[in-house]
Amino acid sequence: QSALTQPASVSGSPGQSITISCSGTSSDIGGYNYVSWYQQHPGKAPKLMIYDVSNRPSGVSNRFSGSKSGNTASLTISGLQAEDEADYYCSSYTSSSTVVFGGGTKLTVL
Amino acid sequence: EVQLVQSGAEVKKPGESLKISCKGSGYSFTNYWIGWVRQMPGKGLEWMGIIYPADSNTKYSPSFQGQVTISVDKSISTAYLQWSSLKASDTAIYYCARTASYLDYWGQGTLVTVSS
């Protein structure tokens, strides 16, 4: 199975909104509502930010939102803050009963 | 509080064997899958496989099938990831994570360094 496709980097200024895309196929993103997003700061373990396409775990800011259209999922961060600077990974359940991650996107807050 | 605590960093030589652990607490260990994720130096996350502690049902990524073994001892709420013959390319941080349709709680990671 191939990794999901994410942009290598995105950037935005404090207060702005950014969107990170995650492209897959009908065998993963398009076939299931099991897309999740993870934030990883340098030297830290990943943290779940969005699950099942658009749900936020308790404690995650409502500035983070997720959506899906066809074979592409998106993570939107509104009101960018310096602390949002991190790597972001999408993942999806697949038709092989496995999970696949995206290659990761480095978010820079200018 | 849900916690996954992993074993400490390891330095091994090529060809050696290794078993790292992940101990769960604060929840019903047998009711949730435990997954393993690899992160090679400076690279992204790679899903390796999962195990269901209640019955040891296991599923591997095709990329890791035959390369590693995932096991569990439910009596001590601990999952394991093991190699029979390490390679330099196994150098990475390995994370365990409680898994449903998402990975909601993660261990702190175990750094495995394989070098002659």
Image (cartoon, coloured by chain):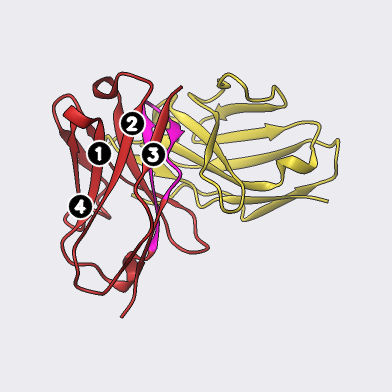
x, y percentage for residue A5? 52, 49
Front residue (pair B73, B97):
B73
Residue A23 lies in the magenta stretch? no
User: Marks 3 and 2, Cα distance to the nearest angstrom?
Assistant: 7 Å
The local secondary structure at tag 1 comes to strand
User: Marks 1 and 3, Cα distance to the nearest angstrom?
Assistant: 10 Å
Which chain comes out yellow in the rendered image?
A
- Crowdedness near tag 4: few (<14), some (14–19) or many (≥20) residues, C-alpha within 10 Å: few
Which chain comes out red in the rendered image?
B
Disc 1: which residue: B79
Disc 2: which residue: B24
First along the sequence among labels 4 and 1:
4
> What's the amino acid at mark 2?
Gly
Instruction: Name the residue located 66 percent from the left edge and 47 percent from the top edge.
Output: A86
Instruction: Name the residue located 62 percent from the left edge and 47 percent from the top edge.
Output: A41
- Note whether B67 is above or below B47 in the view shown: below
Chain ID, mark 2: B
> Are both tags, 2 and 4, on one chain?
yes
> Are both tags, 3 and 2, on one chain?
yes
Side (left or right) of B52 relative to B106? left
Chain ID, mark 4: B
The local secondary structure at tag 3 comes to strand
Bounds of the magenta span?
Answer: B92-109
Viewer-side label of 1, 3? 3
Disc 3: which residue: B5
Chain ID, mark 3: B
